Amino acid sequence: MITLNNIVKIYKTGDIELKALAGVNLSIAKGEFVSIMGPSGSGKSTMMNILGCLDTATFGEYFLDGVNINDTSEDELADIRNRKIGFIFQSFNLLPRTTALENVELPMLYKGINLRKRREKALKALEAVGLSERIDHKPNELSGGQQQRVAIARSLVNNPVILMADEPTGNLDSKSTLEIMAIFQQLNAIGITIILVTHEPDVAKYSQRIIHFKDGVIDEDEIVQHRSLAE
Ligand code: ADP
Ligand code: ADP
């Protein structure tokens, strides 16, 4: 599903060039659950921005579902992001004065889907993350773990094939962290590819594969022994 060939990313700031990625070769198959780890500055965010079609490489090839991302216009990239990719962030990024249900409906509103269909899909997504009892709560009436579950539900309503999560458990206690990882494992079990950036070995161990970045290249590609969090 994902193939990267010799991806290089150079940031130019005035006269200064900085090589954030220095030749990354990587394949991720449909249905994998991958963690990306590495020290600060090793290129993880840059890699996620490229994988998520938020930015493009300076050199190298990126194929996503057979599409050559390097040859793709801004508009097509936006379309690919909307259709294929769900994004989850450390800070949840929910609208504060809006209920859980309305937050989850929002991406469908932008797409012009009618109210009945929006509601139906949002309720289903909230059920999938175990939040059916909290649909009328606003973010400040929910725990951090519950807010992140709302954000995951919101990412699901466009039926993404890939979920990209940047430190999704960075603001959560260990109990909520395990709940979120259990949800990722369930979503992965129904075929969604998951790519997660984390600093925490105790989070990464619930994925299937850990890609370690160092100085803009892959330092180690590690297969993880399966640890199920299923109840
Ligand atoms: P990580 O996510 O592993 O901390 P990043 O991908 O954020 O690493 O950064 C890799 C390198 O690229 C760092 O040296 C960082 O300062 C630099 N960098 C990242 N984004 C930019 C940018 N937009 N402009 C200039 N330099 C950047
Ligand atoms: P993270 O904590 O995820 O590693 P960073 O602190 O590396 O994130 O970067 C946060 C944001 O700032 C990213 O969008 C990155 O592209 C940008 N950034 C990082 N380093 C630089 C830099 N040296 N110059 C400009 N932008 C940067």
Image (cartoon, grey):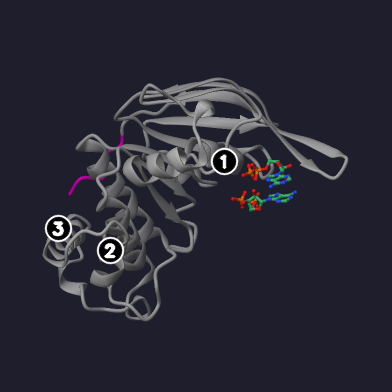
**Residue under pointer 1:** 55
Q: Residue 176 magenta-drawn?
A: no
The residue under the point 52% across, 26% down is 71
Mark 2 highlights which residue? 109
What kind of residue is marked 3?
Answer: Lys
Whether residue 230 is in magenta: the answer is yes
Q: Mark 1 touching mark 3, by CB under 8 A?
A: no
Q: Quarter of the image for the N terminus: give it.
A: top left
Q: Position of residue 41 (x, y in %)?
A: 69, 42
Residue 160 is drawn in which quadrant? top left
Say which of marks 1 and 3 sits in front: 1
Q: Residue at x 23, y 34 (%)?
A: 191
Q: Secondary structure at mark 2?
A: helix
Give the CA separation, mark 1 to mark 3. Answer: 32 Å
Q: Amino acid at mark 1?
A: Asp
Distance from disc 2 to disc 1, alpha carbons, whole Å, reads: 25 Å
Left-right relation of 111 to 49 = left
> Relative to residue 221, is residue 231 depicted above or below?
below
Please name which of the two marks, 2 or 1, marks the residue nearer to the observer. Answer: 2
Q: Which mark is residue 124?
A: 3
In the foreground, 154 or 110: 110
Q: Nearer the viewer, residue 63 or 92?
A: 63
Q: Main secondary structure of the magenta part?
A: loop
Write the start and end of the magenta stretch as one range. Answer: 227-231
Q: Tag 1 or tag 2, which sits nearer the N-term?
A: 1
Place of residue 154 in the rendered image (x, y in percent of width and height, measured from the top left)? 30, 58
Determine the image quadrant of residue 121.
Answer: bottom left
